[in-house]
Image: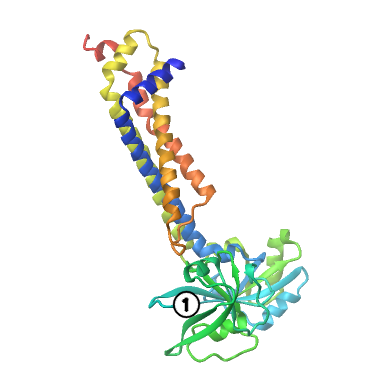
Amino acid sequence: MSTAIHLALTEIWRNRGRFLLFSMVVALITLLVLFIAALGEGLGAGNREYLEKLNADLIAYQDTARLSIASSRIGCEKRRSIRSLEGVRDAGAVGFSSASILLAGEPETLDISLIGVEPGKPGEPPVVRGRGLLRSGADEAILDRTVAAVTNLRVGDRVTLRTTQGNENEFYTLEVIGISDSRKYSLRPSVIVPIVTWDKVRPQAGKPTGEANPACNVVAVQLEDPSEVESMGQFLEARVDRIEVVDRQTAYENTPGYSEQQATLNTQNGFALLIGALVIGGFFQIQTMQKVPQIGMLKAIGTPNSIVATATIIQIIAITVLGVLVGSLVTMGVALVFPANIPIVFELRSGAMAVGSILLIGPIGGLVSIRYSLRVEPLTALGLD
């Protein structure tokens, strides 16, 4: 083993320029794979974050909506019926729409998801600064972390929303009373407002009706026993007419484009890993072909195939690890300068899987060169046959 390590490291040192250059190629492959993984996490989180973090066990839709939040409408009476059923701890209306925030001193606006909730009910996110919502018709709002970072708004400031109602733009000024963690929905950061305020502010064909208990898109349901999600879903559908009830994961997986988006990004990631394996394999194959005489000399003086193979494996692992390390450090540095509104999220789990995959494809890609080195005949390599 010590002989193999000596041979591997000595060759790397004597050809350090060549090996360093290839380590940078591996670093670029690592950078690409990590960014594709982060993009997948960011886009996925941008679609599912609010629903995934929802403080509810089940989500009720209108039965004809086919799990489309935009197409679902649930009225006040059904919300009350759901809330009154045995096994339901609480239920809250949740409405989704869009709006724009006017940025102070800037011609651009920030597009956001406008989410209406019942104060103190499931659907309202916990705040990390400030306080929660108090009244259903209050002109107040909770900003998610991304909105606060982009707009520099703080608790106590006032935010102006622009929506289209009828044929005109309408402007509403709300007081920022809290900041929550990141709660993106439909790839946009969120502003959470009381449900009556949401019904007044949201884009609509005409002027707001000013209903005290407006219809919502879905109902967030908390259960007395969260372990009974499946049976309670069936129970709710049986007891309340014309609703469809699913868990949170099913809900966000059925948001428009979510599954297709993730499948596309996973395919890109797979192709990036395949290209990485081919590049690494090709480099070490060329490297092995260039040193056939040296391998032949080693075998001629009695060096066993196991040492030749082990030395090659050590080189592959060393170069791959160095490239992955450099690529990971560069990725971490680049991630620090990305704006908060760009949907790239570096998660430990997905990052570790990406790095592990690259570390695995290095030796796999080098198997061809190992096989080639084992087949070198000493006399032929030295030109004596």
Percent of width and height locating residue 196: 61, 84
Horizontal relation, residue 151 to residue 17: left or right: right
Q: Quadrant of residue 127?
A: bottom right
* Residue identified by numbered label 1: 101
Residue 129 x/y as whole percent? 62, 68
- Looking at the rendered structure, the kind of residue marked 1 is Ile
Q: Nearer the viewer, residue 265 or 114?
A: 114
Q: Is residue 346 above or below residue 65?
A: above
Q: Quadrant of residue 302?
A: top left
Q: Is residue 317 above or below residue 296?
A: below
Residue occupying the far right of the picture: 86
SS label for mark 1: strand
Of residues 223 and 314, the one drawn nearer to the viewer in this rendering? 314
User: Is residue 377 visible from the viewing direction of this image?
Assistant: no
Which percent across, then down, holds residue 79?
68, 78
Name the one closer to the observer, 73 or 370.
370
